[in-house]
Image (spheres, rainbow, N blue to C red):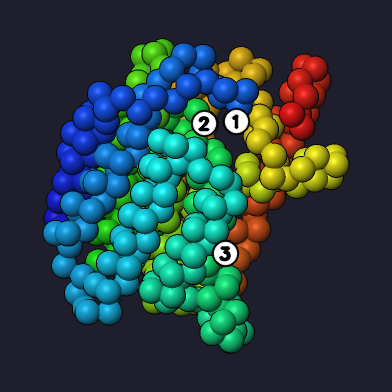
């Protein structure tokens, strides 16, 4: 317990300081057609969160060489993803290049964290590797796509990382608490407090880096613990994955491209309907905490296929919520496929 607190506090303080430095570094996010802000705002604050994770993990007692190697691989992959995002923040890379590099990072992290090859039935190693890499790749892109409202990413990743730590225990818990602490340190600058807008954005560097770290850590835990825990990993960040994938599906059904930038996510529609950034972040935090609680309950009830049922129930509940937001937006005359 003390190790987890030290990890979280170390990550929080380092992230708080480094993100504060990034506030003055001059990397500016200028509004565009997809933006939910109307004035230039500093970005790159997610580098503070990454620095917090690295600092906390450097002090971590992995407990075994295998765990240490896996955590080092996850940290390295997260660092490369963050560097890719920072480069994109600075010079705007092509989407094809970003996707290719991120795909390679996802494969590498999946291999180093150890692919999941058990889903109730044994899977061939290459199939497990492909599925595990797809999990990391999808999570990274989902977090990056959803990084468009003050406090939103932190509102989901902090409860998700805390729940992962409680579920996992041991050195993985200490690492997960470090992730939560790092996001909390960044959130001090990013959260919409007292009615004011966030002062610092995460940027692609932080969104991609922190997503790879979280996804890799969840993957490693799922592989090491077995017993159907693989179903709980997506449940922990369902509020992000669900909004991205359900919105993508809705756009495809309407004949729109799934890969063209848009403002049709549920959180974006809520803001267009008049919800404040603080309200949106708070709602997604409630969803994240609820998903974490369901994951903990499912594991306590025996895990296995109960975890799969918990994920299915979470998906159904979020689908209903997502559908209601879109109906309200459509009734208000908004283009819900924009």
Q: Secondary structure at mark 3?
A: helix
Residue pointed to by mark 2:
148
Q: Residue 40 location, x and y as percent?
A: 43, 17
Residue pointed to by mark 3:
134
Task: Please say whether residue 118 is visible from this viewpoint.
Answer: no
Task: Give the class, few, some or many, for how many residues have Cα within 10 Å of label 3's Cα (few <14, many ≥20).
Answer: some
Residue drawn 58% across the image and 71% down it: 131
Residue 209 to residue 25: above or below: below
Residue 26 to residue 256: above or below: above
Task: Give the class, few, some or many, for how many residues have Cα within 10 Å of label 2's Cα (few <14, many ≥20).
Answer: many
Q: Quadrant of residue 243?
A: top right
Going by the image, does 127 lie left or right of 249? left
Going by the image, does 219 lie left or right of 190? right
Task: Give the class, few, some or many, for how many residues have Cα within 10 Å of label 1's Cα (few <14, many ≥20).
Answer: many
Q: Quadrant of residue 12?
A: top left
| Eye-nearest disc, 3 or 1 | 3
- The front one of 27 and 185 is 27
Going by the image, does 210 lie left or right of 230? left
Tag 2 and tag 3, C-beta contact below 8 Å: no
Task: Please say whether residue 96 is visible from this viewpoint.
Answer: yes
- The front one of 3 and 116 is 116
Q: Residue 248 location, x and y as percent?
A: 71, 45
Residue pointed to by mark 1:
267
Tag 2 and tag 1, C-beta contact below 8 Å: yes
Going by the image, does 27 lie left or right of 124? left
Residue drawn 55% across the image and 78% down it: 128
Q: Residue 98 location, x and y as percent?
A: 52, 51
Mark drawn on residue 333 = none
């Amino acid at each position: 317990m003390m190790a987890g607190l030290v990890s979280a506090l170390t990550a929080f303080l380092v992230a708080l300081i480094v993100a504060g430095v990034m506030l003055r570094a001059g990397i500016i996010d200028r509004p565009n057609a997809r933006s939910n802000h109307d004035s230039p705002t500093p970005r790159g604050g997610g580098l503070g969160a990454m620095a917090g994770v690295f600092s906390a993990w450097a002090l971590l007692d992995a407990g075994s060489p295998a765990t240490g190697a896996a955590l080092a691989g996850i940290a390295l992959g997260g660092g490369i993803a963050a560097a890719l995002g920072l480069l994109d923040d600075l010079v705007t890379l092509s989407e094809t290049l970003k996707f290719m590099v991120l795909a390679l990072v996802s494969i590498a992290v999946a291999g180093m964290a150890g692919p999941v090859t058990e889903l109730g039935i044994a899977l061939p190693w290459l199939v497990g590797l492909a599925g595990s890499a797809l999990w990391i790749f999808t999570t990274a892109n989902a977090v990056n796509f959803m990084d468009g409202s003050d406090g939103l990413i932190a509102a989901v990743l902090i409860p998700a990382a805390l729940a992962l730590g409680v579920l996992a225990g041991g050195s993985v818990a200490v690492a997960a608490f470090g992730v939560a602490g790092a996001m909390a340190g960044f959130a001090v600058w990013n959260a919409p407090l007292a009615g004011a807008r966030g002062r610092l954005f995460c940027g692609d560097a932080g969104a991609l880096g922190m997503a790879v770290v979280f996804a890799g850590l969840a993957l490693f835990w799922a592989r090491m613990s077995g017993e159907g825990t693989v179903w709980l990993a997506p449940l922990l960040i369902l509020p992000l994955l669900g909004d991205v994938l359900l919105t993508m599906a809705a756009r495809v059904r309407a004949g729109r491209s799934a890969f063209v930038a848009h403002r049709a996510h549920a959180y974006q529609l809520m803001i267009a309907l008049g919800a404040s950034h603080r309200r949106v972040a708070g709602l997604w935090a409630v969803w994240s905490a609820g998903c974490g609680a369901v994951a903990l309950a499912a594991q306590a009830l025996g895990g296995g296929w109960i975890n799969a049922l918990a994920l299915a129930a979470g998906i159904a509940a979020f689908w209903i919520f997502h559908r209601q937001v879109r109906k309200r937006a459509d009734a208000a005359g908004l283009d819900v496929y924009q």
